[in-house]
Amino acid sequence: MAENSSETSGSVPRRCPTHSSPGERNASAGVGASKWIRLNVGGTYFLTTRQTLCRDPKSFLYRLSQADPELDSDKDETGAYLIDRDPAYFGPVLNYLRHGKLVLNRDLAEEGVLEEAEFYNITSLIKLIKDKIRERDCKTSQVPVKHVYRVLQCQEEELTQMVSTMSDGWKFEQLVSIGYGRAHQSEYLLIVSREVKGEESTLPNNSGEVCPTTLCLRAGHCMIPMLSIHTPLAIVCPK
């Protein structure tokens, strides 16, 4: 369990008092106290058992729980072992040692957990994470690549600024002259594109105010209508 204050929220369950002698009670208390270990990971406290930390005999946490004299470890004022690591990623590592399963929140990267597993030298978790990353990357590479095309209408004097301020990932495809607009200014259609994968390729619900079609551009095997528009229009086509 984790806690964000200096007080431990969890505790060893209390037993009903017996009529044992004071010496026996002190001995029992000593055994119970040694069963639990308190960790201060990056300012967040975790309370766990010595048995949990001993799951991997080659790990850093095993050596810590055994008070390895060769391990340079410090304790804070509460007696918790100080570990200068990210507590958000320590949670999944500790839970893996508890029940042997890796459970990740959506906001945690698998590479981050791998980094922690390697730091604590938990060999089985390292292998598990690497397999998951390999499987994830394999699925990602199999997702068909699509292209989103944007058609932007602009005047000649605006071309340089539009190209120079193009968002990351967008690249120039074609420039089409559509004659003259107001004040005898030359007008153009600027076509840009970027690659998308998976859910990102979904068309937007509102693509802008559209006037009648004037031209067509062939991109690969896909015919893309060139529209005179006031705001960008996104069109998705397969690669």
Image (spheres, grey):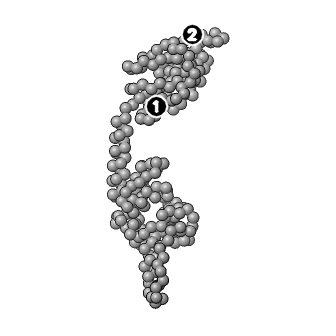
The structure residue drawn at horizontal position 35% and vertical position 40%, both measured from the top left corner, is 139
Residue 88 in view, yes or no: yes
The residue carrying pointer 1 sits among few (fewer than 14), some (14 to 19) or many (20 or more) residues within 10 Å by Cα, namely few
The structure residue drawn at horizontal position 39% and vertical position 63%, both measured from the top left corner, is 98
Q: Number of marks in the image?
A: 2
Q: Nearer the viewer, mark 2 or mark 1?
A: 1
Q: Does the CB distance between marks 2 and 1 fall below 8 Å? A: no
Determine which of the numbered discs, if any, sits on residue 100 in the image: none
Task: Name the amino acid, label 2.
Answer: Gly
SS for callout 2: strand
Farthest residue to the bottom: give it. 21
Question: Residue 135: where, in percent of width, then height?
Answer: 34, 44
SS for callout 1: loop
Task: Name the amino acid, label 1.
Answer: Thr
Question: Residue 131: where, in percent of width, then height?
Answer: 33, 49
Question: Residue 41: where, in percent of width, then height?
Answer: 50, 62
15 sits to left or right of 133 = right
Question: Residue 38: where, in percent of width, then height?
Answer: 48, 68
Determine which of the numbered discs, if any, sits on residue 202 in the image: 1
> Residue 119 falls in which quadrant of the image?
bottom left
Q: Which of 18/163 is in front?
A: 18
Mark 2 highlights which residue? Answer: 179
The structure residue drawn at horizontal position 48% and vertical position 29%, both measured from the top left corner, is 203
Residue 68 in view, yes or no: no
